[in-house]
Amino acid sequence: MRPALLLGWVFALLLACLFGALGAWQYGRGVAKTAFLEAWDSALEAPPETLLPWRRAEVVERPQPVTGRIDALDGGRWLLLDNARRGSEVGLRAYFIASVGDDRGLLVDAGWLPFDRARGLPDMPPLPRQEPADGLLVPWPGQGIALGESGFAAAGQPTLLLRLERERLAADAGVDLVDGLLRLAPRDGAAFARDLDALPNTLPAEKHFGYALQWWGLAFATLVVATVLTLRRRPR
């Protein structure tokens, strides 16, 4: 085989392997999200456990229905996650840290609210006291690629966040944060819009499977093109 042809095939095989690996990664993401959705649906139908007193030391790995009441951490603040979607709208998702005893805290998703950047951060209500804790304990959400670092406002003041970085939130609050968060269920009279959608701001499993097929199709097409070019170069 001529050196140029050999080099072309090495490049084609490397490219096909890359496309195949990306397809396998997307397929794995789809499988994981399918399993997560099944666990989520099961949690919505399961009887809730009492949230407090807190006895869970483990990482929250799957949705768990809970009930009870919680208090915001003394000296805490509202944590407002920027660029949070609710349907077609983009706004803020409001979080606070609840005290769960023994210098431990639990991040609580209190719901979504609109955000007009021209007017600055919205006026926030007092932090919840004896808030109904009906909802789901869920794993800590993935944060994607860090494109900037969140800064904290003065103590007790609402803070706009770009990411939910558990270590930084724990250091700001002065507590050990549980590796998971509480999504509060919809309730009449709640300060913010709530839902228990399983995958807010993320792609559904079907999208990942579709992307996997596209990457595998590119891998197959690369090999087909390399084969056709090889056959055309054969001496007659």
Image (spheres, helix red, strand yellow):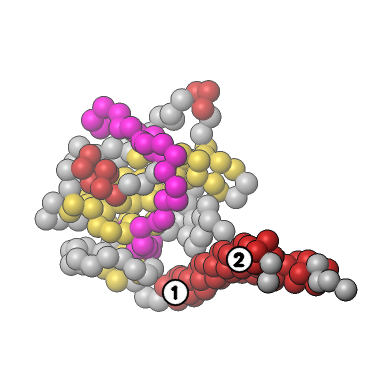
Which one is in front, 21 or 41? 21
CB under 8 Å between callouts 1 and 2?
Answer: no
Amino acid residing under circle 1? Ala
Left or right of 1 on screen, residue 96? left
In front: label 1 or label 2: 2
Extreme residue toward the top, this view: 118
| Amino acid found under the numbered disc labelled 2 | Val
Instruction: Give neighbour class at mark 2: few <14, some 14-19, many 20+ (Cα, 10 Å).
Output: few
Q: Is residue 130 left or right of residue 148?
A: left
Q: Residue at x 56, y 41 (%)?
A: 90
| Residue 231 image position (x, y, % from top left) | 80, 72
Return the residue at label 1: 39
Residues in magenta? 133-162
Numbered circle sitting on residue 10: 2
Residue found 53% across the figure and 23% down from its top: 118
Label located before the other in sequence (1 or 2): 2
Residue 139 painted magenta? yes
Q: Which secondary structure, mark 1?
A: helix
For this rendering, which residue is in front, 94 or 62? 62
